[in-house]
Image (cartoon, rainbow, N blue to C red):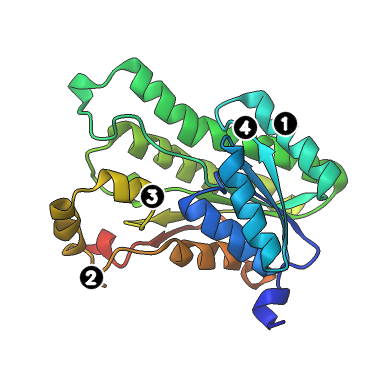
Amino acid sequence: MSERNKALIGRTAIVTGGNSGIGRAIAVTLAAAGAKVAIAGRNQETSGEVVAEIEAAGGQAVAFPYDAQIEDDANDLVSSVVARLGDPVICVANAGGTVDGTAPLAEMTTEMWRRTVALNLDAPFFLYRAVVRHLIAVGKPGSLIGISSVASIRGVPSLHYAAAKGGLNAMTMNLSVQLGSHGIRANAILPGLIETPALQAGLPEAARTKMVRRVPLGRIGAPDDIASLALYLASDASGFMTGQLITVDGGMVQT
C-alpha cells in the first residue's frame, strides 16, 4: 500500500451525492486511501453500484438513503453513519444541481429559486450542522469539504445556482473561523467544466467546443481532478488549511 493509500486509514467519510459524477469519484478515491465511506444519496441502486466497486477494490463502504433537501435526513444520516461506520471526521457536501439553470431573472419562478437554493445551500447547512454537533460532542477534529462552483465567482447565466454556491463559499469561510478551536476545518472546491453525466446530457457538441476554447488547458476536467483535491483536503497533508475556496477549472476563471 502506497503512502497515498495510507492517508485515511481508520477514518470515516460521508459523501453526499456519492453515487454519480464528481461524488462517485470522491467516494472511490477516499476509500482507496483507506477511509470507510458512507455513500449518501436518493438512488440506492446506483449507490449500491459504487459500494460494490469500492468493495471489489478492497475498500469499505455502505450506502445510506438520503435526500439532501430534507433537514431530518441529515440528522438521521449522521446517526446511522456513526452506528455503522464510526464518527464522520470527513464530510463532503457534494450533492447539488440546478432547476432550469439558464433561466433569466425575469422568467425565473420562485419555485426554481427555492429548489436550487435548497439543494445547494440549505442542504450543506443541514449536513454540516449535524456532523459538527456530533464531532464537538465527542471531541474529535474533522474536515468539511464543500463542492461549490466557479459559477459562484464568475458571471454566468445561472443566477440561482451561482447565488447558492456563493452562499456556500461564505459559509465555508465563516465556519473556518467558528470551528477552528475545535480542530474542524472547512474548505470548498470550485470546479469548472467537469465531465459528468449531467454535463454530457446537457451540453450540445457545438457548445462544448466553444466552452473548451475558453479553458487555457484545452480540455474539460475529469471527476478525478476534483477527487484528488478532496483527498488532499481530507488528509493531514492539508492540516493547516482552512477557509479556502480552491478553483479547479483548467484556468478558465482567469479568461
Mark 1 / mark 3, whichever is N-terminal: 1
Mark 1 / mark 2, whichever is N-terminal: 1
Is residue 75 visible in the rendered image? The answer is yes
SS assignment at label 1: helix
Query: Disc 1 to disc 2, how far (Cα)?
Result: 42 Å
| Label 2 Cα neighbours within 10 Å, binned few <14 / some 14-19 / many ≥20 | some
Label ID, residue 216: 2
Query: Disc 2 to disc 3, how far (Cα)?
Result: 23 Å
- Up-down: is 102 above or below 255? above
Mark 4 / mark 1, whichever is N-terminal: 1
Label ID, residue 241: none
Query: Disc 4 to disc 1, how far (Cα)?
Result: 8 Å
Relative to residue 130, is residue 160 drawn left or right? left
| Of labels 2 and 3, the one closer to you | 3
Label ID, residue 75: 1
Amino acid found under the numbered disc labelled 3 = Pro
| Of labels 3 and 4, the one closer to you | 3
Residue 102: x and y, percent?
23, 34
Disc 4 target residue:
126
SS assignment at label 3: helix
Mark 4 / mark 2, whichever is N-terminal: 4
